[in-house]
Image (cartoon, rainbow, N blue to C red):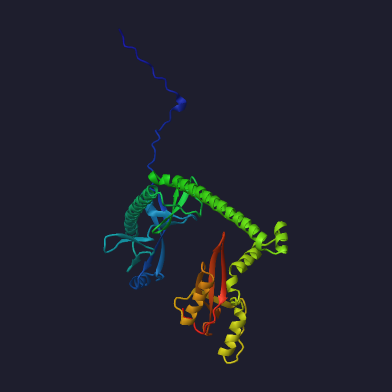
Amino acid sequence: METATRAAVRRPELVTDHEVQPAPEAVRHLTVLAVYELSETGRKACLLAGGDGRALQQLKVQVPANRLHLVEVDARGTAKLKLRPRFEMDTEQRVVRKDIAPKYDAPPTLEALIHEAARNHQLERVYKAERNLARLKRQEAEQARRTQIAEAFLADKSQRALVHPTPSPMRCSLTTGQGRMLFDVATDVGVARNVPAEALRRFRADLAARKEKNLRERAVHLALHEEKKRFVAEWMAQHGTPDQRERLAAGMLRMSEAIEAITDHVLAPLGDWPRYPKDGVERLAEHHRVAVAGVEVEVSPRALEVVNSNTTSVDAAQWAMMQEFRARVPNATVTLRCHRLGIRGRPDLSPLLMSGVLVTVSHGPFVLRREYEAQSESIRG
């Protein structure tokens, strides 16, 4: 049996006289700008070599394509050798960044510039790695702190978030020893994500409790007001004038007038004692006319400053006066008061001291107060 051989048909149109071999790729270079500085010695050497002797030198160099990692290109398309900023090792073997160009004592060669850029590039990588590690450690510490604060907040039911801004289901702010801290469901992780919801629940619970308390207090105040109106109506029916009873029936009698009439009736035993006068402006002006030897000192109601306090010690005359008040109104509380009158913003002017006797007595739903002038030459606070 004969072996069959296949005839190879050659297509003349695809055959050339010479085989085309790919030419080796030419080594490509990039023209970049190298910026460096010369010391005074380097500037002298530069002048001797025919250069310009400037401190800041800019040189165009050719960098091979396989060393382009040593080149940076700005937004304007300017390619520069990575010589600035500089990265160096400090005394503690840490990489530090300096925003300066390298300085030479003689014009450097291309190999020296490439070597400096390579060293700078390597230290830059170490610098960024160290910063990333430090940043990661700070983030972990901050996350641990946030978790600790969140756990303490969730465990302590008495803690509250800040009401400004108002807590929401997504975020809230807590007060910490280092200031306020924002918790956000969109960025927090772990237990910290539960803080906004719990803060909002407590905030709404406080609002509901405050509303309920206000409603109870309002109910108490309304009940007390109704009791006062009922008491005034009964009192006016027995002791009021016909005019007062008519205005009360028409709903036109002021409560302040009714209280004043009740106070006159209850403190009638002290009716012969003069009331404490509300003439502080006139009395202080007279006091300064005498104290400043006739010099007119302007005293106005806006400038009048009054400081009130209870007297802690009394003389014999004041004590006898207080005892007489208690004897006349046995169920009253008698307090000796000291009033210090002065001019606001004028500490150089001597103040005027006045005394009064404050009588307080409970009568029905009212607490009646009236102050009488204390006739005494001295008062000690």
* Nearer the observer, 354 or 141: 354
Q: Is residue 335 above or below residue 63?
A: below
* Nearer the observer, 19 or 98: 98
Q: Quadrant of residue 281?
A: bottom right
Residue 376 is left or right of residue 8, and the answer is right
Give percent across and percent down for residue 253: 69, 61
Q: Is residue 285 above or below residue 90?
A: below
Give percent across and percent down for residue 161: 45, 52
Q: Residue at x 29, y 63 (%)?
A: 90
Give percent across and percent down for residue 231: 61, 58
Q: Is residue 156 visible?
A: yes
Q: Quadrant of residue 373?
A: bottom right
Give percent across and percent down for residue 332: 52, 68
* Nearer the observer, 297 or 333: 333
Q: Is residue 345 visible?
A: no
* Nearer the observer, 360 or 11: 360
Image quarter (top left, top right, bottom left or bottom right) of the N terminus: top left
Residue 127 is left or right of residue 215, and the answer is left
Extreme-left residue of the structure: 92
